[in-house]
Image: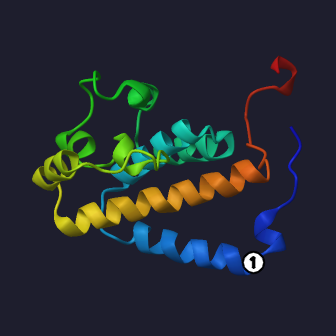
């Protein structure tokens, strides 16, 4: 797959606007590990290879292990996630790419038991940010920076 264009070079103002939201999320006070799991989960659902490569590498640098990242697809059954990671809209579909399934009162109430109102808003902003990055990367076929040999492809 060949990249169609480098959207960030073509429209630096759009990149600056998106980077502003990302900077807010990064400085929101939410745990980096939680934010990385949200990014990975949304990118899995969206099918964004570019973002998955980047985010799993970033998560590893922060100490996240491969087992937890692999289990994100089955987070409800996996006993390796904290209450904050599972009760809020973090890895749940309520804050991911599936806009057809809005966050129900029950899920929001469950999230409020593990997260403050500000954390719920900030986690939702994190989901909005990563979904936006995913949409840009997918639309213009951003090429993932893989470490594996291309001959295997």
Rendered-image quadrant of the C terminus: top right
- Asked whether, in this view, residue 122 is left or right of residue 130, the answer is left
Image position, residue 84 (x, y; %): 21, 46
Q: Is residue 75 left or right of residue 99?
A: left
- Identity of the residue drawn at 16% across and 63% down: 116
Residue found at the far top of this picture: 152
Foreground pick, 102 / 72: 102
Q: Is residue 96 above or below residue 15?
A: above
Question: Is residue 125 shown left or right of residue 106?
Answer: right
Residue 82: tell me if it is visible.
Answer: yes
Task: Identify the image quadrant of residue 30.
Answer: bottom left
Picture coordinates of residue 97 (x, y %)?
A: 50, 47
Residue occupying the far front of the picture:
100
Q: Is residue 77 above or below residue 22?
A: above
91 or 99, nearer to the observer = 99
Figure quadrant of the N terminus: top right
Residue under the point 53% across and 48% down: 58
Residue found 19% across the figure and 51% down from its top: 105
Kindly state the secondary structure of the residue where label 1 is placed: helix
Task: Characterize the local packing of mark 1: few (<14), some (14-19) or many (20 or more) Cα atoms within 10 angstroms.
Answer: few
Q: Nearer the viewer, residue 98 or 133?
A: 98
Looking at the rendered structure, the number of numbered marks drawn on it comes to 1
In the picture provided, is 86 more to the left or to the right than 151?
left
Q: Which residue lies at the image location 83% right of the left edge and 61% below the top edge?
A: 6
Q: Is residue 62 visible?
A: no
Protein image colouring: rainbow
The residue that label 1 is drawn on is: 12
Residue lying farthest bottom?
A: 13
**x then y, percent, for residue 129:** 51, 62
């Amino acid at each position: 797959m060949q990249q169609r264009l480098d959207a960030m070079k073509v429209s630096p103002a759009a990149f600056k606007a998106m980077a502003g939201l990302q900077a807010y999320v990064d400085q929101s006070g939410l745990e980096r590990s939680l934010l990385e799991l949200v990014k990975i989960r949304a990118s899995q659902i969206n099918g964004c290879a570019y973002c998955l490569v980047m985010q799993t590498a970033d998560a590893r640098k922060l100490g996240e292990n491969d087992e937890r990242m692999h289990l994100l697809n089955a987070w409800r059954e996996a006993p390796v996630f904290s209450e904050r990671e599972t009760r809020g809209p973090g890895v749940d579909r309520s804050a991911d790419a599936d806009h057809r399934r809005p966050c129900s009162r029950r899920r929001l109430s469950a999230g409020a038991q593990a997260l403050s109102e500000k954390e719920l808003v900030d986690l939702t902003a994190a989901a909005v940010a990563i979904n936006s990055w995913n949409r840009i990367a997918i639309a213009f076929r951003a090429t993932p920076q893989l470490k594996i040999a291309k001959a295997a492809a």
